[in-house]
Amino acid sequence: MSLATIADQEVHVDEEGFLTEYDEWNEALARQLAANIGIELDDRHMEAIRFLRDDFESEGETATLRRVTTLSGIPTKELFQLFPKKPAKKLAYIAGLPKPTGCV
Amino acid sequence: MAANKLRRRLPHSEWAITIVDQDSEHHYQPGYLLIPFGVYDPSTVVKPSKRFLPRGVNTIIGEIDLVEPDMNRVRTAHGTYLQYDELVIATGVSPRPDQTPGMVGSEWRNTVFDFYTKEGATALADKLRTWDGGRLVVHISEMPIKCPVAPLEFAFLADSFFEERGMRDRVEMTYVTPLDGAFTKPVASKRLGAMLDERKIKLESDFYVESIDNEKKALVSFDEREVPFDLLVTVPVNMGADFIGRSGLGNELNCVPVDNGTFQSTSWDNIFALGDAADIPTSKAGSVAHFAIELFTENFIQHINGDEMTHIFDGHANCFVESGDGKAMLIDFNYDTQPLPGKYPVPRLGPMSLMKETRLNHYGKLMFKWIYWHALLPGRRLPMPALMSMAGKEVVEE
């Protein structure tokens, strides 16, 4: 774990740049994190991100794509358009949450 | 397994145990893998369940319709109510080809096969006997699945099978996975990825299947990639029992959310979910269930005595990975420690080698069938500790 400055804020990140402290996240940060991976956030992105954060708060782990689709109603196909190629990982990165534990 | 362990520990005068099983047969599921290659005959993986149940347990063969946790009762499909003080759910997960559009289409069991059922594995054995080559695609629909190494083993064994038949050059193999590599954990993923490479098996990663196009004979992903096949061996989405969903006890895959260390339901104190039926973040594998139930038995006794449960499970998993050509490798890991090289179960001596392909590991895998029927199911103690040990493991750079 190390300190990084993102959107003029000092935050804790892991070796892959994922935020490690739930409470250090805010929307300005999210915009910068998204920009880092070439995504410009709109309302639909934010809906998915908010779902992921709320779900993490109650469940203590990052939701899988199936969970996001089932509970938030955003179709998997759309998640792939919003967060191309690796939606689960990108969503977690922007939402300031741990990478989803690739189920073993 | 749980019934066998608990019946021994709970006084008959105080505790009645009832098992509801939808099937009167018990299948040795790890054996399915070897059926397609003609190594096991399908008849050898099935035995009557009653042979493995202890005396003093009531058995009801039938399906469960609903659990009503606020009423402490279970309704069977026949409409009978069973009242309980404590409920243990061990209904596992099953492959659900119906969850992927086009999977159960015109090509199902024609050029599209699964091997996680006895019927699928048997049909695939018939297919492989006469198949003369082409594009073979081995595919995982979605994680988690039972025995996550089995599709890799299938690919390795298929490579070896075609080699032996002198037709390897006529088969183009691709391994398609939703993961970002061959496996989940970095060291094992690298090693297993290299093993795919050595066998000229192409890896198509980060592939989330949206549908199967029966006309084109291709897998189609959500991000619009297509992988054409002449023969598809797929692992369908795995889901827990439907009654779990209907009863409001499950997550989006009908697995029961439980405490990772004790398997107690996060919503109901008198409900436990063991094995694959639970949502714990470790492999859905027989070894996990075995290690877990050793600890669960101790916890359960504490729980019914009103004591704190202190036998905390660490996610210990231990899997033989068949790699073809009469060899296998062994991996041993838990929630926090990924598979590492070394020796098992005795440090330095083994005799099994971790993360290395050896003949002895292969014999270990074959021997496991005997152990399963004769020691594991009857609930006998095995000479391996339930919790993972770092002794004998080498820490390596990722």
Image (cartoon, rainbow, N blue to C red):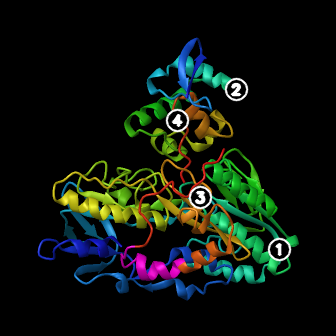
Instruction: Name the amino acid type tagged 2.
Output: Gly
Instruction: Name the amino acid type tagged 1.
Output: Gly
Tag 4 secondary structure: loop
User: Can residue B27 be seen by looking at this rendering?
Assistant: no
Tag 1 secondary structure: loop
Work out whether B371 lies above or below B205: below
- Sequence-first tag of 3 and 1: 3
Label 2 lies in what chain? A
Reading the image, the residue beneath label 2 is A38
Instruction: Name the amino acid type tagged 4.
Output: Pro
Part of the protein shown in magenta: B368-381
Question: Do discs 2 and 4 share a chain?
Answer: yes
Label 4 lies in what chain? A
Categorize mark 3 by other alpha carbons within 10 Å: few (<14), some (14-19), many (20+): some
Q: Where's the C terminus of chain B, which quadrant?
A: top right
Q: Nearer the viewer, mark 3 or mark 2?
A: 2
Distance between the Cα atoms at labels 3 and 2? 31 Å
Question: Do discs 3 and 4 share a chain?
Answer: no
Residue situated in front as seen by the camera: B360 or B155: B360
Categorize mark 2 by other alpha carbons within 10 Å: few (<14), some (14-19), many (20+): few
Distance between the Cα atoms at labels 2 and 4? 20 Å
Kindly identify which numbered label has been placed on residue B100.
3
Which residue sits furthest top?
A: A8
Question: Do discs 4 and 1 share a chain?
Answer: no
Question: Do discs 2 and 1 share a chain?
Answer: no
Q: Nearer the viewer, mark 2 or mark 4?
A: 4
